[in-house]
Image (tube, helix red, strand yellow):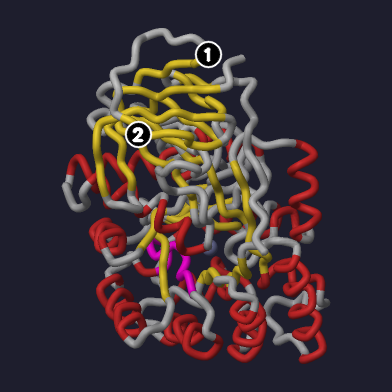
Amino acid sequence: MSEKKIIKNALIVDPESYKQFYGNIIIKDDYIDEINSDIIPDFADGYEIYDAKGNILAPGIIDIHAHTDGYYFCGEKELAQGVTTVVCGNCGISPAGITTKGFYDLQEQKGFNINQTTFTGHSFTLREKAGATDCYAPASQSQIELMKKLALQDLKDGACGISFGIQYAPGTTTDEFNQVAKVSADFGRPVSVHTRLNFPNDWESLKETLDIAKNTGAHVIVSHLSYMFADGQMDRCLEMIADYRAKGYLISADSGMYTAFSTMAGSACYDEDQIKANHWDYSQFVAANGIFCGQHLDKQKFEYMRANEPNNGIICFTGVEEDIYKALCFTDVMVSSDCGKALPGQGHPQDAAVFARFFRIMVREKKLLSLIEAVRRCTYLPARTIGIKDRGRICKGAKADLFVFNPDTIKDNADFPGIGNPDLPPDGIEFVFVNGECAIKNGKRVESCNAGKILRFN
Ligand SMILES: [Zn+2]
């Protein structure tokens, strides 16, 4: 196999220098060795040549918010969209409920198609390990101390930060939230936060999260704005974020491209008081997995899932589409999939489609973002936010995680269970390189390529 590869005739988009230009990229081993504008022949001894004519060459996508967590089928759906790195362990759930070291070691042993890094999760995992097993009850100070100790060990073992899913552990006091977040802040790592409630006009939950940046100094990433505030509340949400940012606090956010969210049937999000407060009707709920997959639920089926399939997803059809566009145009909001474990034919189309949908709608159809800004929001910006220094950019010496796509044809094809196939890969993806290896060639998966690495932070 050739050691060197050339991707030629591309429109290269570098979100770091904010420049785009026609040229070629030469890959040596797993890094970018040279960027030039030479005329490259079709054959050259010692080189594999990939023709990117008519396409964009960007850094591989870095998915800042996902639950890919070592699930190979999730990774495959991500890769098919141009994702080369995924940030796992969001919403307070560590991958497989194990330590960061345990997850990293296991993944390195098994191998994976794309790069993974993970947050250590507070609201399910750390809480459970510390014995705070009742999600509705506050943790004792000794349990909080244990969570802090476990979190610190995970950070030392290379976790990218601590994630919170306060909505899923409503017993969490603001004090517990602050104490655990401070461990990440003191270690120089960010926190990602799925906020406490999404009741209409409940601003205390967002304030509590933004105050974490003020109280602890942590860089706070507010998770999936699309799923928390895209119900006519986005203007106020973005105003509050802008206000804290103006005061110098480190606040970022991510958002998907759908208003309909999916979460576990048994979670506190689907408790009766939440359903009432949000004025949700059972007919808005569709099973994402399980025996009712693709069906609209009634009270009986909903209760069956809560009792018997608590870990299966229920999709809630809600929200205002324009709110997503507002979020994704706001300063430093990144694009995220929220991808999670699902069997083939089940789950949320976000897993297979969110990034292609983002480029189709935000850039090509609505022209709300320039191409380079759209690329920045799913590559360089997430890299900078969590501190990945050698990916998410196009420069000599950077890791060769690269994404070649056609901006005129990129299009999402997946749809919700019951309506379409949630797994369908997008159109317009030509080549994807992971650590210098070609994982997608002329739109087709190179099955033998599993070049993902574990990204440890320290
Ligand atoms: Zn979440």
Q: Residue at x 28, y 65 (%)?
A: 330
Q: Quadrant of residue 122?
A: bottom right
Q: State yes or no: residue 174 in magenta.
A: no
- Give the percent coordinates (x, y) of residue 146: 81, 81
Q: State yes or no: residue 223 in magenta.
A: yes
**Please, what secondary structure does the residue beneath circle 2 have?**
strand
- Give the percent coordinates (x, y) of residue 298: 50, 54
Q: Quadrant of residue 302?
A: bottom right
Q: Type of residue at label 1?
A: Gly
List the residue tagged with mark 1: 46
Image quadrant in which the N terminus is located? top right
Q: Residue at x 48, y 76 (%)?
A: 197
Residue 295 in view, yes or no? no
Magenta residues, start to end: 220-228
Q: Type of residue at label 2?
A: Leu
Identify which residue, 54 or 12, lies in the foreground: 12
Identify which residue, 86 or 362, lies in the foreground: 86
List the residue tagged with mark 2: 57
7 vs 134: above or below: above
Q: Residue at x 64, y 30 (%)?
A: 450
Q: Residue at x 45, y 70 (%)?
A: 222
Q: Which mark is residue 231?
A: none
182 vs 426: above or below: below
Identify which residue, 238 or 320, lies in the foreground: 238
**Please, what secondary structure does the residue beneath circle 1 have?**
loop
34 vs 212: above or below: above
- Give the percent coordinates (x, y) of residue 453: 65, 42
